[in-house]
Image (cartoon, rainbow, N blue to C red):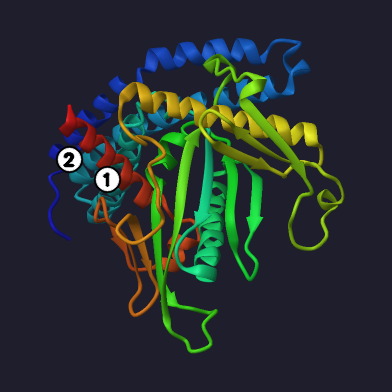
Amino acid sequence: MASIDFSAEIKELRSTFASIEEVSDVEELKSAIAELSEAAGAPDLWDDPEAAQKVTSALSHKQSELERLKTIEERIDDLEAMVELAEEEDEADLLDDAASELADIQAKLAELEVVTLLSGEYDAREAVVTIRSGAGGVDAADFAEMLQRMYLRWAENHGYPTTVMDTSYAEEAGLKSTTFEVKAPYAFGRLSVEAGTHRLVRISPFDNQGRRQTSFAAVEVIPLIEQTDSIEIPESDLKVDVFRSSGPGGQSVNTTDSAVRMTHLPTGIVVSMQNEKSQIQNRAAALRVLQSRLLLLKKEQEDAKKKELAGDVKASWGDQMRSYVLNPYQMVKDLRTNYEEGNPQSVLDGNLDAFIDAGIRWRASSRNTED
């Protein structure tokens, strides 16, 4: 094993940690935890279950954030003590353990650094993700379903609750489109770098001649609105259609006209919801997503940057941001960051963190260049 200058490495760890601690604003974090703890202890908290869920979720997130910082600081202290003991006792095995711990702490600090880059106006929000099949026929519809599974698995791996809000099935296989929520703090900040056109190259399972097929799917990510956002939509601006939910297998939601399609007449934005059995619930969910999209549109207009957050996604050649190649070789490559991995199945199983982190760093670097 190559000799490691532990003194220099530990000094670098402390410097990096100090920067992260400063950006994280530990005192503000402690203050927020105190306020949320007080709110969580209110006797009437669960009179409003939705509000209570937000309070307890925010408290858990803040506590976890503070605990991560404390744990990293303690591990750096313990590493320094381990190195001192190993050098005093001339213990080579202990130095090997110290080298392993050093590498792990460096990796954890790199993860925390990425979180500090999530400083956009809506980065702390929960996310609404919409996936639409693009060019490529039935393979594109199948790819859209593969991407839905990938993101839902990613959320599951992190313990983030998800709700599929709307699904439009393709005739032969796969999905025309799907919309789902990821209910976790900073879900939008993380997943917003996934917005764009995704490209799949593989031997088509739907081609009886076994030819290679290229297909596309578009991913849109928007922040979930909060009541304080005050996006008011006059009833006169809305066209609401109700219809029978669609889906495989004669589900109970298919027996009534409970699905809702909501059109915002001034912008032409259309939102469909069919997850709930009640038309009233689907209407409320559709209105919430419509408000989120209008909030994003307002942000884009104020910034004069077309599709800054969700992107103008065409789902076709010349517009892709990531390629998933299953044949003639195995690779997933992000065309913005140039980050790549040689195990597509692992990525499609939800192991996306490295791509997301690279995307967040790329976005932050791009913003700094623009500034």
The disc at residue 151 is none
| Amino acid tagged 1 | Leu
**Front residue of 134 and 359:** 134
Q: Secondary structure at mark 2?
A: helix
Quarter of the picture containing the N terminus is bottom left
Position of residue 347 measured from the top left corner of the image (x, y, whole percent): 43, 60
Say left or right for 119 vs 250. left
Residue at horizontal 27 percent and vertical 45 percent from the top = 102
Say left or right for 187 vs 39. left
Quarter of the picture containing the C terminus is top left
- Spatial separation of the CA atoms under disc 1 and disc 2: 8 Å
Position of residue 37 measured from the top left corner of the image (x, y, whole percent): 59, 14
> In which quarter of the view is residue 180 placed?
top right
Picture layout, residue 289 above or below residue 228: below
Say left or right for 160 vs 370. right
Q: Earlier in the sequence, mark 1 or mark 2?
A: 2
The residue under label 2 is 9
Residue 187 visible to the viewer: no
Picture layout, residue 198 above or below residue 208: above
> In which quarter of the view is residue 232 placed?
top right
Residue at horizontal 56 percent and vertical 21 percent from the top = 226
Position of residue 55 measured from the top left corner of the image (x, y, whole percent): 61, 20
Does the CB distance between marks 1 and 2 fall below 8 Å?
Answer: yes
Picture layout, residue 343 above or below residue 219: below
The residue under label 1 is 102
Residue at horizontal 35 percent and vertical 73 percent from the top = 330
Picture layout, residue 243 above or below residue 26: below
| Amino acid tagged 2 | Glu
Q: Secondary structure at mark 1?
A: helix
